[in-house]
Image (cartoon, helix red, strand yellow):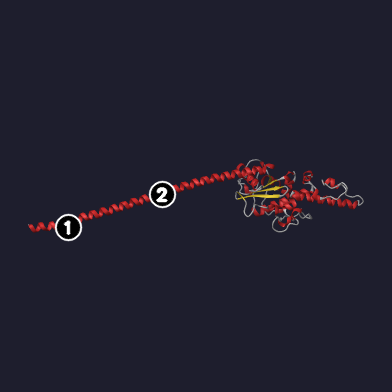
């Protein structure tokens, strides 16, 4: 299975098997609760990993989704923030057609706007704009020092090379940096799409980007804005308990997913053995019934044949007695 379907299965099994912790007991999603607000088991879950790329794993009707291919939710289109001119990351450009192309060429997609590659390239563009503004103010020696701040490998008197900026720069950005608004918007668009298309019951977010402390709350708020009251969702302040949560496994989500897949494979093997035993038992019963039926039919035939020959014998004896009576009986009358 995939590296996102596996943690999706792990999160799904953990939630249903345990229903523990504040993130479960305070669940206010009406779809997952009984009238007394007790959380009930779910049948669907989405796991989103947000890092270098953005991937989606799905469990629907309690089973991982495969179909034509594994889910590729990271490539669905999104609605950019108003005034956003970024367009998408460089990975999607210049590769068109089959054999390596990226859907929508990465233009205004979840991954094209929200993965760490896209966010780093966007940050580089922001720095270029800042540098251009400084150039306008001081054309004599404008822009010095910007490349060093950006983490660029170029010299301090050169223009910033947005592609030379390392993605690790994102970890240094404050939680209120505009970069995170764009990340939250991309992921919230994905959450909204999952809610509308699959009526998903629980969405779990993982990956390196979720280390940003304020990102989850931004996703909650933006998701509520995008859904626009169309669905009966928990209040924004309750989404972190009831609907859109971070992975309880953190960086071990993939490992726990692998363990979950191994458990499922073991269960399926045991079920298969039990089914084989059941099939063998049913076959033995069928054979026994057929043997009993054959024996009964043989007994019936034997009884019929015995009765038939007994009838012939009795008939023959009777016929002999009649003949004897007719011959000797009539003779005795003549002698008298």
Question: Badge 2, how many Cα within 10 Å: few under 14, some, many 20+?
Answer: few
Tell me which corner region of the image, top left, top right, bottom left or bottom right, holds residue 77.
bottom right
- Residue nearest the observer in this picture, 73 or 233: 73
Query: Which residue shows up at 15% across the image and 56% down it?
Result: 325
Asked which quadrant contains residue 87, the reply is: bottom right
Give coordinates of residue 280: x percent, y percent.
Answer: 47, 47
Residue 198 or residue 136, whichever sits in front: 136
The numbered disc on residue 42 is: none
Q: In this view, does 251 lie above or below 67?
A: above
Q: Is mark 2 on a helix, strand or loop?
A: helix
Q: Earlier in the sequence, mark 1 or mark 2?
A: 2
Q: Residue 323 carries which label?
A: 1
The local secondary structure at tag 1 comes to: helix
The residue lying at 28 percent from left, 53 percent from top is 307
Give how far across and how far down residue 1 sits, in percent.
Answer: 63, 48
Q: Mark 2 points at which residue?
A: 289
Residue 62 placement (x, y as % from top left): 60, 48
Residue plotted at (53% across, 46% down): 272
Quadrant placement of the C terminus: bottom left
Q: Is residue 334 above or below residue 245?
A: below
Measured from the top left, where is residue 205 in percent x and y? 69, 46
Name the foreground residue: 316 vs 233. 316
Does the image show residue 294? yes
């Amino acid at each position: 299975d995939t590296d996102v379907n596996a943690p999706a299965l792990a999160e799904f099994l953990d939630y249903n098997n345990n229903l523990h912790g504040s993130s479960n007991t305070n669940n206010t999603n009406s779809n997952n609760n009984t009238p007394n607000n007790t959380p009930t088991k779910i049948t669907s879950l989405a796991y989103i990993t947000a890092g270098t790329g953005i991937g989606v794993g799905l469990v629907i009707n309690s089973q991982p989704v495969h179909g034509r291919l594994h889910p590729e939710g990271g490539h669905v289109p999104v609605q950019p923030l108003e005034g956003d001119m970024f367009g998408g990351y460089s990975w999607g450009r210049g590769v068109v057609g089959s054999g390596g192309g990226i859907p929508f060429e990465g233009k205004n997609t979840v991954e094209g706007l929200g993965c760490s590659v896209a966010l780093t390239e966007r940050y580089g563009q922001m720095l270029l704009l800042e540098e251009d503004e400084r150039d306008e103010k001081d054309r004599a020696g404008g822009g010095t020092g910007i490349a060093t701040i950006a983490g660029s490998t170029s010299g301090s008197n050169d223009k910033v090379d947005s592609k030379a900026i390392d993605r690790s720069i994102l970890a240094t950005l404050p939680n209120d940096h505009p970069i995170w608004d764009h990340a939250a918007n991309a992921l919230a668009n994905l959450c909204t799409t999952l809610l509308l298309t699959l009526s998903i019951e629980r969405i779990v977010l993982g990956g390196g980007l979720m280390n940003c402390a304020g990102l989850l709350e931004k996703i909650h708020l933006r998701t509520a804005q995008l859904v626009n009251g169309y669905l009966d969702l928990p209040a924004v302040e309750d989404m972190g308990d009831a609907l859109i949560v971070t992975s309880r496994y953190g960086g071990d989500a993939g490992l726990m997913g692998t363990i979950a897949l191994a458990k499922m494979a073991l269960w399926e093997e045991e079920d298969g053995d039990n089914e084989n035993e059941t099939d063998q038992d049913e076959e033995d019963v069928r054979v026994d019934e057929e043997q009993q039926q054959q024996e009964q039919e043989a007994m019936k035939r034997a009884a019929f044949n015995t009765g038939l020959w007994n009838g012939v014998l009795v008939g023959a004896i009777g016929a002999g007695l009649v003949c004897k009576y007719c011959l000797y009986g009539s003779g005795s009358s003549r002698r008298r």
